[in-house]
Image: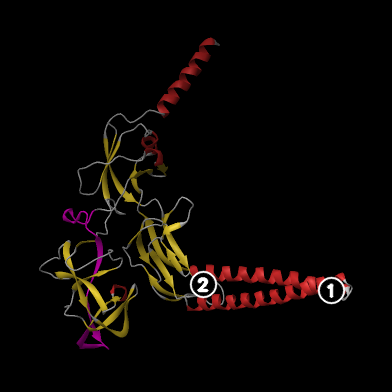
Amino acid sequence: MKWNYVLLISLLINAQTGFTKEVTTEKIYDGVATPVISTTIRFGYNDAFRGIITYVARPGSILRGPEYDATGKVIRPGTLLVKMKTDYRKSVVDGKLAELESAEANLKNAKDNYDRFSGLIKTDATSMQIYQQSLADYLSAIGHKKAAEADVKLAQVMLDACTFEAPFDAIVDNVYFPSGLCAGELDIVKISQLFPMGIKVKMDRESALKITPATMVKVYPCGSDQALGIFHGMSYLLPDGIMFRVNNYQLPSSEGGKNLPVCRTSPVFMIPFDGNMHKSVAAVPQESILKDEAGYYLWAAKDQLDARPDKVQDMVFAVKKVRIVPDDRLLGVEPHSLLRVLRDSGGLKAFSTILTPPFPENLKDDDKVCIYNSRYLFMPGDPVKVVIGQ
């Protein structure tokens, strides 16, 4: 009996030791940068007016999530992801505000009647029935005013819902519905989280179970010999391996652009006019046009042309203010931005580089800026080398 008991304890110890045995020898795996969260955003209304989509961020766009203060109030909203036409929702808000004004007027009238009959009932100058009716009308008017206030808030919520910002740092994977009239809640756009980035490694379950928070794991970004560690407490098992999580951040645009404003750019497009391939007009993204006391202008890069097969544009360049005269026409050439036709381009050529929002504060002629680089250290689908063990 004693020997059986010793044997049982020995077997339990050996089993436990085998289960928690850590990786002691170094082994190299092929990993893939895989977003931990990928989600499809659905957008639209299910009431009388389904809504008209007017903007969806273009595929490949890098999105920033919102910033909050300590109380949870948004102090910087996330990057605009989807926008719907607001005319109908604004009219609903206006209608509800008018109903609220009517409810407030009725409440004032009901209160005046109640106050008057409250004085008369004390001297028996009115009947109890009339007094009670005035009280009921007054209380009813209070309820109608509260209901009207609630209707205004709800209408405002529906108006605010016409704009949807990115809920976290992400990249736009696919756009399923770029613009147009909705037919209920549609799949509009798919986004994937960028921070932290998941690193998926395929391995058998026995090997995955041996990886503990004390296991050395090194991840090498694509094309780099500089290793990163993992967030050990965030790893989890997959049916065919394990998912690690690593730090991920946006790569600097240029070594020479440190401490310079980072800007997004666009070329000046030349668009065939009314289908006439022999006549083109200059056009720029509508949001790139600014206005001051002297008129309309663009911020343009000095001596920079995009889309050249023989020369790339510089990552760092000086800018200049270019006076333009916009036309009244807007072109829906692409679904992500309306292009404003220029009556006078101010000397800008086809594919001249201009700045688009957000613009740096207090920008002036000859200031240098750096081109925005839409790359993170790890991008979804990147092949990476993962070294596990020591």
Number of other residues with Cα within 10 Å of mark 1, as a class: few under 14, some 14 to 19, many 20 or more: some
In the displayed structure, 256 sits above or below 337; it is: above
Q: Are marks 1 and 2 in contact (CB under 8 Å)?
A: no
Q: Residue at x 26, y 56 (%)?
A: 375
Quadrant occupied by the C terminus = top left
Type of residue at label 1? Leu
Tell me residue 107's x, y (percent): 70, 74
> Circle 1 sits on which residue?
120
Q: Which of the two marks, 1 or 2, is nearer to us in this view?
A: 1
Residue 100 placement, left or right of 174: right
Residue 201's spot in the image, x, y percent?
Answer: 33, 44
**In the image, what residue occupies the spot 28% across and 73% down?**
288
Residue 310 lies in quadrant = bottom left
Looking at the rendering, the stretch of residues picked out in magenta corresponds to 252-281
| Disc 1 element | helix
Frontmost residue, 96 versus 175: 96
Q: Residue at x 37, y 55 (%)?
A: 169
Name the residue tied to disc 2: 184
If you read the primary sequence from the N terminus, does the residue marked by circle 1 or circle 2 appear first?
1
